[in-house]
Amino acid sequence: MTGRIIGLGSYIPKKIVTNDDFAAFLDTSDEWITERTGIKERHIADHITEKPSTMAVEAAKKAIEDAGIDPKDIDLIVTACTTPDLVIPSMSCVVHEAIGASENCGCFDVNSACPGFVAAWNTVQSFIETGNAKLALCIGTECNSNFANYNDRGTCILFGDGAGAALLKADESAKPNQFIMRSSGARGGCLRCEAARQPDRWEEEDFKTATSFYMQGREVFKFAVSEVPQIIKDLSEKFSFDLNDIDMFILHQANARIIEATAKKLGIPRDRFPMNIMNYGNASSASIPMLLTSLKAEGRLKPGMKIVMASFGAGLTWDANYIIF
Ligand SMILES: CC(C)(COP(=O)(O)OP(=O)(O)OC[C@H]1O[C@@H](n2cnc3c(N)ncnc32)[C@H](O)[C@@H]1OP(=O)(O)O)[C@@H](O)C(=O)NCCC(=O)NCCS
């Protein structure tokens, strides 16, 4: 038994922040941001009605509607979130209540920054493959704007908010979940954000900055353009498939240049690497399920398609999966 996607849904915050909006208060320009990142605009939550928990609920409800199932049959909810509005309960428990799931449903969150959705996916699949779940929600939800430093032009322009959810159903005929996950704690210093509740440090100079995203952009860029193509190549060798047979490469949407460089290094046509980064920026763990949802809505995702998902981010962590839609 392996989980097959039977429903997808997303929630995108209403407010759009364009590159020109940033140029109004930062030393930056639409031209610079577009050229270096591919991003034109991103959606930012209102933090009142739109929070990681409420966005996760809306995305989950849409995935349930898309699948046409009874939420009482869901027996596992795993949510990837690094920017939660609640420390406890988990985002998954908030979703549990809102969708009316039964008490036979397990709930927990995973924190693995941008690759969180893929980590949640592998967790869910491991439950399904060991017979411990049959119908599971796998969610990515983020309010990166909670932690962006809007004085730092090198980071704040990259991030957006949003949520995406996939409903996975155990299927005897589905191909086993095939994946590789890698990490390098030693390289983690180039992408950090400290926890805000450290009373012994509140008086420290720059503590507010330390509790916002800190990033050495160029280091992260170099890491991504080297490790992402490599892990995809290693995945194809480990599971003996030809990358030329893959219909779509669903990559974490962090920078259009990283995606283009990956396509080039693998020698795969760029049009097999769909992107939505121009409209949503980097929505961290929500980026892959948001992209899957929009591709399905556009009719571009068809049953039986061969897909490679790959993500990377803070940790440093990176991973890749081979799935059949
Ligand atoms: C952040 C990123 C877009 C910066 O692009 P870059 O080409 O590497 O640019 P650099 O950081 O080397 O900076 C080059 C110059 O542009 C400036 N700059 C940085 N941000 C700018 C902005 N928004 N507008 C205008 N200039 C900017 C820098 O200050 C620097 O100026 P200097 O040469 O006078 O010092 C790019 O490195 C990147 O996308 N990295 C990966 C980040 C990522 O994906 N993080 C999330 C992982 S999940």
Image: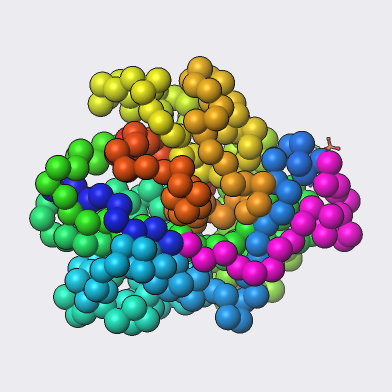
Residue 122's x, y, as percent?
A: 29, 48
Q: Quadrant of ligand 1?
A: top right
In the rendered image, the vertical position of residue 215 relative to residue 13, given as above or below = above
Judge by depth and name the residue closer to the eye, 226 or 259: 259
Q: How is the image coloured?
A: rainbow
The residue at 34%/36% (across/down) is 305
Q: Identify the image quadrant of residue 148.
A: bottom right
Q: Is residue 258 left or right of residue 103?
A: right
Q: Residue furthest top?
A: 267
Q: Is residue 198 left or right of residue 32?
A: left
In the rendered image, the vertical position of residue 249 relative to residue 103, given as above or below = above
Q: Is residue 264 left or right of residue 229?
A: right
Q: Is residue 75 left or right of residue 312?
A: left
Residue 236's x, y, as percent?
A: 33, 24
Q: Is residue 318 visible?
A: no
Q: Is residue 283 inside the magenta stretch? A: no
- Which residues, given as a range, are shown in magenta? 10-31
Q: Residue furthest front?
A: 299
Q: Is residue 27 inside the magenta stretch? A: yes
Judge by depth and name the residue closer to the eye, 102 or 127: 102
Q: Tell me how many marks there are.
A: 0
Residue 41's x, y, as percent?
A: 71, 54
Q: Is residue 43 visible?
A: yes
Quarter in which the C terminus is drawn: top left
Judge by depth and name the residue closer to the eye, 216 or 100: 100
The residue at 49%/21% (across/down) is 268
Residue 39's x, y, as percent?
A: 70, 46
The residue at 39%/71% (across/down) is 61
The residue at 70%/40% (across/down) is 37
